[in-house]
Amino acid sequence: MENENGLNKIDDRRIQVVTPGRDAWSLIKEITQGDYQEDAFYICDINDVIAQYKKWKMKMPRVEPHYVLAALGAGFDCASKEEIRKVLELGVAPSRIIFANPAKKASHIRYAAAVGVTTMTFDNENELYKIKRYFTDARMVIRIRYDDLSATYVLGNKYGCDPKTEARDLLLVARSLGIDVIGVSFHVGSGSKDNAIYAKAIEAARHVFDVAETLGFNFNFLDIGGGFPGGRSEDFYEISRSVNHALDTLFADSSIRVISEPGRYFVTSAFTLVSNIHSVKEAVETDAASGDPVKLQMYYVDVSVYGAFITVLCDEFYPPKTLYGHLDARKYPSVVWGATCDGVDKIAHNVMLPKLKIGDWIVFEDAGAYTLSIACEFNGFPPPNVHCVVDEDNWKLLRQLRTFPKGRFVVGKTMEDFFTELPASYIAEI
């Protein structure tokens, strides 16, 4: 594919191998110094994902993360037939997949049955009747509700049964239908801010385990969901300590399998988004409190809240940073506007930035959670390309763990080579 400058767009299926010690900022500076790049782009740092995985395994060794990390041995949390299909195409065994959607279409249940994905969740009686009709041999997991009301996205208003008032009755229905229920799942909400909430939810799960035992079930599976923070400034230690203590206290039996669904944790800090300022103007607004006029610097970039920043509409904030230092150290009230013609498309309002000009670049860190996955192309602006990088040491690690298609990793090229697609003779295909 070519962009409007006649240059080939990045093939986001490839991963560029770089020398150890190259961080995202150094790579961004190398890319933006040339005249060949004006479109917004992501740097996806595979090294960061691997580091997050290693930290997870060190801090919570008993909890199996279920996320799209096939080469590292993770399991997979899928929400639909299409997600299951994509994961299976990676060569992942169906036993490593949990169909973690409590409200499934009949055709998706039939597909799971056909491909051997047997573990799935439920939270209501009607779902059990569907399972009885379409997949009697499924291994079901009852999803309970236990919300962190301070989370960025609270999920309990949509999914989950009450562990004390509803779980027992649902288990009785499952028993009457001859459906095998193997354990409990919960999700405290995406972007959890309460370090103690997981321990409280695990305690609620323990209650359901005990109720199930009185009904003749033999539970051996616990899914503690997602919501784990993954930003650069967020500390995973307190949460992991709380989870480990709760598991050691309430689920000491090591035969009980414990999994999780930590998508945000793995990708938040791995993605850095970079966008070019293509238009600038000054405007005057009236201060709501004082009534005084306030001069604003208005910056227009080629990403939007309908593309990379749709979560801004849900009150998430991505502080814009400047790529290079400026002679004038003063900062001014500024607005960063998105690319579309919609007045709602405001990425950042009343932020303090140095005075910028057309052609300057701004950087948004921690841009990996729910950006690309739910982006659209409103007004004809596509989501930014993704440039994946990995250092030589982790490249060798990944190749030891998994066989990759020829050409997936690219070595021996500069950033300018990669962006302008020089002839194939410059590429060492592995």
Image: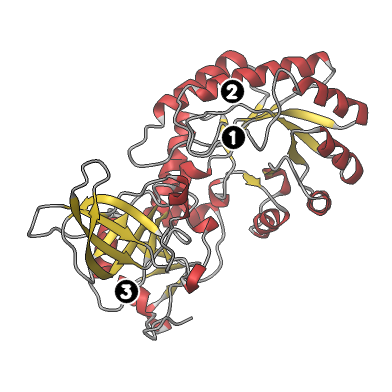
Front residue of 37/23: it is 37
Q: Measure how far apart labels 1 and 2 are at the Cα level.
A: 10 Å
Residue ID at (41%, 32%): 236
> In the shown orientation, is residue 119 left or right of residue 300?
right
Residue marked by disc 1: 225
**For the residue carrying disc 1, how many other residues have a C-alpha within 10 Å: few (<14), some (14-19), or many (20+)?**
many
Labels 3 and 2 touching (C-beta < 8 A): no
Q: Measuring from the top left, give residue 320's x and y in whole percent.
A: 29, 53
Q: Is residue 420 above or below residue 227?
A: below
Residue ID at (87%, 44%): 135
Labels 1 and 2 touching (C-beta < 8 A): yes
Local SS, label 3: loop
Residue marked by disc 2: 201
Q: Earlier in the sequence, mark 3 or mark 2?
A: 3
Q: Residue furthest front?
A: 291
What type is the residue that disc 1 sits on? Gly
Residue ID at (53%, 47%): 72
Q: Measuring from the top left, give residue 231's x and y in whole percent.
A: 38, 42
Q: Earlier in the sequence, mark 1 or mark 2?
A: 2
Local SS, label 2: helix
What type is the residue that disc 3 sits on? Glu
Front residue of 27/359: it is 359
Q: Earlier in the sequence, mark 1 or mark 3?
A: 3
Whether residue 13 is visible to the viewer of this picture, yes or no, is yes
Local SS, label 1: loop
Q: Measuring from the top left, give residue 126's x and y in whole percent.
A: 84, 37
Residue marked by disc 3: 38
